[in-house]
Amino acid sequence: MRVAALAGGVGGAKLASGLEAALPDGGLSVIVNTADDFELWGLHISPDLDTVMYTLAGIANPETGWGIKDETFDSLGMLGEYGEDTWFLLGDRDIATHVLRTERLKKGESLTAVTGGLSKALGIPSRVLPMSDERVSTMLDTPYGRLEFQEYFVRRGQRDEVLGVELRGIENSRPTGEVLEALSGAAAIVFCPSNPVVSIGPILAVPGMRDALADSSAPKVAVSPIIGGKALKGPADRMLSSLGHESAAAGVARMYAGLVDGMVIDRADEGERAGIEALGMRVLVTDAVMRDEADRARLAYEVLGFAEEISGSSGRSG
Ligand code: GDP
Ligand code: CA
């Protein structure tokens, strides 16, 4: 069975690793947000691709969910000694990823090819696919002014209210051939529990992506990143509210209405079932919190079972 998953960083990577464990080697393609990519000291940094790669390679820092475990930060310390502002944490081993990515991009390789090479070297059996090879940059409007995504997220610690989102360059982006192939060949498509606005949002905004999803007859299921009205980590809940969405599993479902056939929600949100079903979606209520590896695999099995159930049931539209 071939599965395509849409993912951002930490939340997405957790379910992706569960899906990888639940599927035969090579069965999973992860389509990853690249709209928070940016440059620092000449290095091309792809935070969400790195989080997914490190997680699938089993080298992610389990405390943060991002970065590499047992990292050292000597290079960053030296940059600080030179007087540089070291607000974005880059570990010594992590820097090697960015050095190679930057060099290979400069030589003309696509981000898809570069990511494929790095993933292979890390022994990842799944395909880790940037949503697009073109550069897209998330810009956020806040009361403090317009902020680049990492300025908002890391430098200012997500403290600003997000009043608007611009995906700079999105109109010139397109899904890669690898992404289109992953979607058309998938027996199930999973929207991981990633931020619907700044992780899944940019993927869906790539021109042609929604059509590619609509063209696929595979069952599509989303796992809510919002549990009990709250994000488990990060600003997704506040972002949903300030942008006029509902910070609830049902609010996420509304954003995905017409795109997904089923929504996986936590037991804490059982009360939202009827409201989500009224959107024309099937609902699976389960424990949607992934505390450890066993949780990730268990949730992945449940998500795949749910997708199978949807594709097997009659009366499914599209
Ligand atoms: P980022 O790019 O690193 O910010 O990561 P994502 O966008 O992929 O994920 C952020 C979202 O993951 C947050 O909204 C969290 O609520 C969600 N999340 C993190 N861990 C879990 C989990 O165990 N279960 C669920 N359902 N959501 C999670
Ligand atoms: Ca991200």
Image (cartoon, helix red, strand yellow):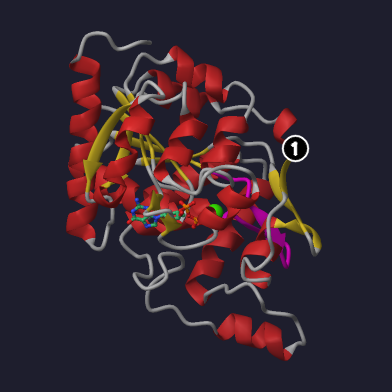
Residue annotated with mark 1? 169
Nearest the viewer among 265 and 77 is: 265
- Indicate which quadrant contains ligand 1: bottom left
Q: Is residue 315 rendered to the left or right of residue 168? A: left
Tell me the quarter of the picture where residue 284 sits: top left
Mark 1 falls on what kind of element?
loop
Q: Is residue 123 rendered to the left or right of residue 247? A: left
Is residue 34 a member of the stretch shown in magenta?
A: yes
| Quadrant, the C terminus | top left
| Residue drawn at 64 percent across, 51 percent down | 242
Outermost right residue: 145
Nearest the viewer among 39 and 294 is: 294
Amino acid type at circle 1 is Gly
Provide residue 94's location: percent of width, then percent of height. Answer: 51, 68
Q: Does residue 123 appear in the picture of this structure?
A: no
The magenta segment is 33-47
| Residue drawn at 48 percent across, 72 percent down | 93
Q: How many labels does the image show?
A: 1
